Structure formats: structure tokens, C-alpha cells
Amino acid sequence: MEQDMCYLENAEEYSNDKLEKLKENFEIYRDDPVCAVVVGSFARREATNQSDLDYFVITDDKECGDKVLSQFPDFLKSHDIKAPSDGGAFGGTTKVGQMLNNVGGKDGDNDSLTRRLLFLLESECLVGEDMYNRIQDELIKIYVKDGITEHQICRFLLNDLIRYYRTICVDFEYKTSEQSKSWGDRNIKLLFSRKLMFFSGLLTVAQTAQSTCIQKREVLKRYFNLTPIQRVREICGDHALTALGYYSDFINCIGCADTRAVLNRTHMERDTHDEEFRVHKNKGHHFTWCLSRLLDDTFDANHPIHLALKF
């Protein structure tokens, strides 16, 4: 188990080193009305030299936002880090209002949902900490209304989290079927990193039961400032070791160039599934079963999180 966990430790060290250099790079913008945010594997402290860097900039000042964005390409090139995919939710700017308005409304699109949920669940602020904290606090207040009762968990947040996770799953089918995006690597990520992010969110929501409105907000802020792995470790304790062992192996898998090549040439058709892919796929199923048992072991059958996930 210690050998397995070393992959998580190595990824954390690599991620922290790059994030520290990024923050130094953007220190010159500390007094500007802008917030630069990293999400994805680097923010989760799970990055390897095979990872791309997902980021976006929040500002109502277009000129300032463009200046900050212009700094990323040179940094990525000099540190041999891949840029985010073109045309998605990352690599651009968004306004403060786009982060805080239309939560659950018909005018909110998938990119806004993605940025909002990842901002809460797995983000790291590079510059603009005051704006970052203000948006985080406002989002938490949106999800935890003043009238919520003590026995309730934060169902609004839970439902938006479920919506986002299901959107990821549906988006996977669309991108691989209609946009001809790579199938194998996305499939394995769905089984591991996307699932752990979702699971850590479920644990966080569950922690808000039997507490006042103010306490619920404090709980969310505390756990949102941890990485998904840190949340799972803190809430589930040693019971999480088996699941995290599988996850550490996934980090090793996704960080290996040869394995990534295998995943990238694997398609939905079964005749492209070689033995190495099937091994990782099988471990993903075991990881899922571990998380399911972990939820039951952490919260007894009468806990409201179980009912909320059904109805």
C-alpha cells in the first residue's frame, strides 16, 4: 500500500512545484481586478508530466483579463505543460456575474456549470485571492439559503453536483460519438478522477446534516478549500485506504506516456480493447465498488444523504 500511495505523493509534489511557479509568475497582477484560477489535475494535486493545465480568468475588466491570459502560453511552453483543449470551458475569461447568476436557470450553459462546480470542488487561486474568496462565499450562500433547517443537507448543491456529474457522463458520449474525441483515456478518467471529484462532493454535502445555516456554510467552505483526496481522507479516515490505493495506481497509469498511448488508441469497439486497457478498466470497477462501500461505511443507513441520492 505504501508503494501504491507514492504515486499520489509524487503527483502532489510535481503539482505544488508548478503551482508555486505559476503564482510567482502572476504576482505582478495582485492589485488588478482579476482572479486567475487553475482547476483539474494540477488543482487536485494529481498532475504528472502528461497532464494539461486547465485554467480560466474571472474579471469584469476585459483589458486586464486579456493581459493575464496572455501570460499562460509562454509559461506552458517554458515548463513543457500542455494547454487546455480548444473550444471548451477553459483557457478564456468569464465575468463575475457569469459565475454567480443563473444557477440552475435556463440561461446557464454547460461551460458555466463546469466552471462553477470545478471552482468549488477543485480549484486553486493563482492571483486575486480577495475576489476568489468573495465568489466562493457568494456561491455558498446561493446554495445554502437562510431558511434551510438544521436537519436538512444542502440539497440544492447536491442536485447541481449530480447534474454536473451526469452532464460529464453525457458529454463523454457526445464527444466520443459525434466529435470523434479519444475514447479510452476519457473512459478511464470517468471511472477515476471524475468519480472521485463527485464522491468528494457527496461527502461534503453529507457533512452539512444536523447543523445551522451558518454552520453548513462554514462546513462547505472548509471542505471546499481541500482537494478531493484530502476531503476523502479527512471524512472517511483509514476506511479510504483501499479506494485511494486504486486511485494512486490510476495516477501512475495516466502519468505514463506508453499507457496514455494505449488509452488513446482504444476505441469503444471491443476489438480495440487490449489486455492493458482491460486491466485498468477492471481496476476502475473495483474503485467504484470501494467508493460505494465507503459511503455506506461512513454514513449509517439513516443518514439523509442516502435518501437524497434516491429521491
Image (tube, grey):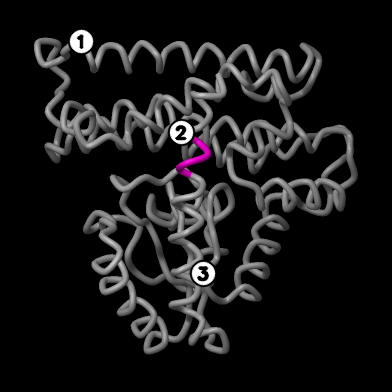
Q: Are marks 3 and 1 in contact (CB under 8 Å)?
A: no
Q: How crowded is mark 1: few (under 14 residues within 10 Å), some or many (20 or more)?
A: few
Mark 3: amino acid: Leu
User: For the point 48% across and 65% down, which residue is it?
Assistant: 37
Q: Which mark is residue 126?
A: 3
Give me the C-alpha separation between circle 1 and circle 2. Answer: 22 Å
Task: Give the main secondary structure, helix, strand or loop, of the magenta stretch.
Answer: helix
Q: Give the range drawn in magenta.
A: 7-11
| x and y percentages locating residue 51 in the rendered image | 32, 47
Query: Is residue 211 depicted above or below 133 in this figure?
Result: above
Q: Do the residues labelled 1 and 2 touch (CB within 8 Å)?
A: no
**Mark found first going from the N terminus, 3 or 1:** 3
Q: Is mark 3 on a helix, strand or loop?
A: strand
211 left or right of 75 in image = right
Kindly report which numbered mark, 2 or 3, lies closer to the viewer in this rendering.
Answer: 2
Position of the C terminus, as image quadrant, is top right
Mark 2: amino acid: Tyr
| Front one among 104 and 276 | 276
Give me the C-alpha separation between circle 3 and circle 1. Answer: 41 Å
Query: Is residue 39 depicted above or below 271 in this figure?
Result: below
User: For the point 79% across and 20% down, which residue is it?
Assistant: 303
Give me the C-alpha separation between circle 2 and circle 3. Answer: 25 Å
Q: Does the magenta stretch include residue 229?
A: no
237 left or right of 256 in image = right
**Mark found first going from the N terminus, 2 or 3:** 2
According to the picture, the residue beneath numbered tag 2 turns out to be: 7
268 left or right of 206 in image = left
Query: Is residue 225 depicted above or below 99 in this figure?
Result: above
Position of the N terminus, as image quadrant, is top right
According to the picture, the residue beneath numbered tag 1 turns out to be: 275
User: For the point 16% across and 13% down, which residue is it?
Assistant: 274
